[in-house]
Amino acid sequence: MKKDSALTDALDAITEVRAAAARESFAVFRRTVRPGMLWWPFVGQITRELQKFYKAFVYGLRPKLVISTPPQHGKSWAVEDFIAWVAGKHPQWKTIYASFSDELGTLRNQNLQRLFTSERYARVFPNLVIGGPGTGYQCNTSLIEYVGGPALSATPPSTGRSPAWSSTWASSMIS
């Protein structure tokens, strides 16, 4: 019994080390939340470019990034993962995910809800909680509010307030 407990403690420590690495590295985050994802050169490249974009944004450089590839290359997954990673790191930031159709925006919103509530995501970002019944915060097909923070909108809000990440950023991310 003592041996089993030691093994469990060791596995928990490894998990925490990986979670800490995933909070800092977008590539480690993606491999952690999507362990079965095929990691081919394009996935590595888009992941590195999004990490560079994040660093430039944090440094206040107002970067721009356009991702343009044929269908089924992983653009949407990359952007979903990126939004989830940034939300976990900075839940106080507002985010807009813009898409060319309501249907795709709704699909991405639902995918993000599933990711935010997954066990793997919770191990990396245990403090990010999304709205839902009993929280006093909204979570529906067009809006995800972070409990204690701002919202992720699938369509631009009509409040007139400028989000931390502009709709220009969001639309250029998925073009």
Image (cartoon, helix red, strand yellow):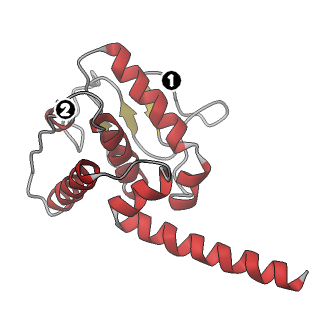
User: For residue 170, which quarter of the picture?
Assistant: top left
Measuring from the top left, give residue 173's x and y in whole percent: 19, 37
Question: Is residue 91 something one can see in this rendering?
Answer: no
Side of 56 where 130 appears, left or right: right
Q: Position of residue 64 (x, y in %)?
A: 9, 45
Q: How many marks?
A: 2
- Residue beneath the point at 44% across and 45% down: 149
Residue ID for mark 2: 167
The quarter of the rendered structure image containing the N terminus is bottom right
Using a 10 Å C-alpha cutoff, classify the residue at mark 1 as few (fewer than 14 neighbours), some (14 to 19) or many (20 or more): some
Q: Position of residue 73 (x, y in %)?
A: 27, 36
Q: CA distance from mark 1 to mark 2?
A: 20 Å
Looking at the picture, how far across and down is residue 125, in whole percent?
51, 58
Check disc 1 and give the amino acid type.
Answer: Asn
Q: Secondary structure at mark 1?
A: loop
Query: Which one is nearer the viewer's eye here, 91 or 154?
Result: 154
Q: Nearer the viewer, residue 33 or 160?
A: 33
Tell me the residue at 35%/29% (across/down). 153
Q: Identify the residue position indicated by label 1 in the image.
A: 140
At a point 60% along the width and 32% down the height, the residue shown is 132
